[in-house]
């Protein structure tokens, strides 16, 4: 793998503390500032809404400014934000600093890093993306225990100070000195609206142009009405592509499901299934470990000529994992009148109310679920990051398209937590919410199929995409002079 992947991996592993620190330090922050943990837990929501609002503008900036410079700016902003957290004295200050975190995520988060890595690879882009995304899993192993130890011994401000030090002393210097954009930029040989304007009769013309040094490029124009060309002056080329909207739906659903599980799975296993908290944490760690393996494996398989089949298998495995969530099939009548499980600390007259609850969840169920869902989770996450590169990575304005897709992903993250939590409050359990997640996972697999129509299902990978329907720019110009334009085969 290129050294740039290692540099991006290092930066991402430090920036990932943005997502990992709040759950670990929320209790300490609440106790120190005199707020409830629920109020402090809302801080990441400010970060999330900031990312939703700025994803599209960040995509425009990434299209005009070298990606490596944007990443360096994002890391500098993150370093300032974490230093500010270490000095903050009120919840209002922490809320304002979450806006800094949101800006940093838009400039130096997974989207820009994936875009940077793609400029260094003509082949095996999906493999490179899979390796890059393992940084988040590695950060999940390192940061939470480190921040917890520092927080308990020296205070939560010292924890944020350590993140700031890692950003300023490691991530930012490495980025400024070593990171640079690669030779395979996202420039195209012609624009989408060139295609639209030649389709005077609504005929679909698909063109693929080989970029410099064999860089694969794919160009598509869905069947559009004649009036479509009239909006060429103000509408992005991809906005009328139904394939892009299927991709947006896939991204939204994927993050909706995974974020819901990330936030509520441990709570469900502990409170609804009666699994001890330490055991629930153990199975969660298994899921994230297999998540790392799933990302690397999916990236490798997606780069094969028959990568579409492997991608569909990964989506089906993800849906199967959602279906295998352990269900409580029998409960002890010691449930409270409201239908809620008693607290693990509650007791009846003999001091064993919670322990007397009868459940049918076994370790074998948990192990099968952790294995299947962990691999499927990793594969699905790599897919939603690799598909835009494989299908549209060589098109002009790809950074803007990626900003749109990232907006859908972040909306999915916010909606997943909000909807799942609300359903749990209304029904008293996660049963219906998790059933919904399984149905949405099947719908996501269907969107994956529609992203790849039959004629493209054999050319998902970047290795084979350049071999499919190649047409030179000279041929394209000749077609513009013809009165009729049949479909290019």
Image (cartoon, rainbow, N blue to C red):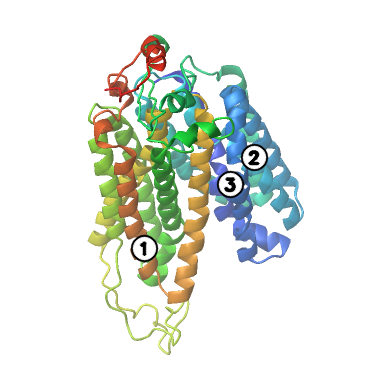
Measured as percent of width and height from the top left, residue 441 is found at 33, 53
Q: Residue furthest bottom?
A: 349
Sequence-first disc among 3 and 2: 3
Label of residue 52 in the image:
3
Q: CA distance from mark 3 to mark 2?
A: 10 Å
* Circles 3 and 2: CB atoms closer than 8 Å: no
- Asked if the residues shown at circle 2 and circle 1 are in contact, with their CB atoms under 8 angstroms apart, the answer is no
The residue mark sitting in front, 3 or 2, is 3
Residue 19 shows in this picture: yes
Q: Which residue is mark 2?
A: 103
2 vs 1, front mark: 1
Rendered location of residue 461, percent (x, y):
30, 28
Q: How many marks?
A: 3
**Mark found first going from the N terminus, 3 or 1:** 3
Q: Is residue 338 above or below residue 488?
A: below
Which label belongs to residue 55?
Answer: none
Quadrant in the picture for the N terminus: top left
Graded by Cα atoms within 10 Å as few (under 14), some (14 to 19) or many (20 or more), the crowding at tag 2 reads many
SS for dot 1: helix
Q: Is disc 3 surrounded by few (<14), some (14 to 19) or many (20+) residues within 10 Å?
A: many
Depth order, front residue of 105/448: 448
Q: Secondary structure at mark 3?
A: helix
- Which residue, as the protein is rendered here, is positioned at the far front? 483
Residue 301 located left or right of residue 241: left
- Residue 260: name its quadrant: bottom left
**Residue 276 visible in rendering:** no
The relative height of residue 213 versus residue 371 in the rendered view (above or below) is above
Tell me the CA gap for discs 2 and 1.
32 Å
Circle 1 is placed at which residue position?
436
């Amino acid at each position: 793998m290129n050294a740039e992947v290692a540099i991006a991996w290092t930066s991402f592993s430090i920036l990932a503390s943005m997502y990992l620190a709040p759950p670990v330090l929320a209790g300490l922050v609440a106790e120190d500032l005199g707020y409830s943990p629920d109020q402090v837990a809302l801080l990441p929501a400010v970060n999330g809404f900031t990312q939703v609002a700025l994803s599209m503008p960040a995509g425009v900036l990434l299209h005009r400014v070298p990606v490596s410079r944007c990443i360096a700016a994002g890391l500098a902003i993150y370093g300032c934000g974490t230093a500010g957290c270490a000095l903050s004295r009120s919840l209002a200050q922490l809320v304002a600093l979450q806006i800094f975190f949101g800006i940093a995520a838009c400039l130096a988060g997974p989207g820009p890093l994936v875009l940077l890595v793609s400029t260094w690879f003509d082949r095996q882009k999906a493999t490179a993306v899979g390796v890059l995304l393992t940084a988040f899993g590695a950060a999940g192993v390192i940061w939470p225990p480190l921040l917890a130890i520092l927080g308990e011994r020296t205070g939560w401000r010292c924890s944020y100070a350590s993140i700031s030090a890692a950003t300023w002393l490691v991530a930012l210097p490495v980025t400024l000195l070593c990171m640079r954009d690669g030779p395979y930029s996202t420039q195209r040989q012609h624009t989408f609206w060139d295609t639209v304007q030649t389709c005077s009769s609504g005929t679909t013309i698909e063109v693929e142009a080989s970029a410099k040094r064999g860089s694969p490029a794919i160009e598509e124009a869905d069947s559009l009405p004649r009036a479509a060309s009239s909006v060429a002056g103000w509408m992005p080329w991809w906005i009328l592509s139904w394939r892009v909207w299927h991709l947006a739906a896939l991204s939204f659903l994927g993050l909706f499901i995974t974020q819901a599980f990330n936030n509520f799975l441990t709570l469900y296993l502990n409170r609804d299934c009666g699994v001890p908290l330490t055991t629930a944490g153990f199975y969660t760690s298994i899921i994230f470990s297999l998540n790392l393996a799933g990302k690397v494996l999916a990236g490798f398989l997606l780069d094969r000529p028959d990568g579409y089949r492997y991608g569909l298998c990964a989506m089906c495995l993800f849906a199967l994992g959602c279906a295998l969530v352990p269900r409580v099939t029998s409960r002890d009548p010691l449930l409270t009148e409201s239908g809620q499980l008693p607290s693990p600390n509650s007791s009846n007259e003999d001091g064993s109310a919670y322990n007397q609850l009868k459940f049918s969840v076994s370790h074998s169920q948990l192990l099968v679920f952790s294995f299947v869902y962990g691999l499927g989770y990793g594969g699905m996450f790599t897919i939603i990051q690799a598909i835009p590169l494989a299908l549209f990575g060589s098109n002009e304005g790809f950074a803007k398209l990626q900003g749109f897709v990232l907006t859908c992903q972040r909306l999915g993250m916010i909606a997943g937590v909000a909807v799942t939590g609300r359903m749990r409050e209304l029904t008293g359990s996660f049963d219906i919410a998790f059933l919904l997640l399984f149905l949405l996972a099947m719908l996501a697999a269907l969107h994956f199929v529609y992203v790849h129509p039959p004629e493209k299902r054999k050319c998902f990978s970047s290795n084979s995409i350049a071999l499919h329907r190649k047409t030179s720019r000279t041929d394209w110009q000749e077609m513009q002079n013809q009165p009729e334009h049949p479909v290019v085969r």
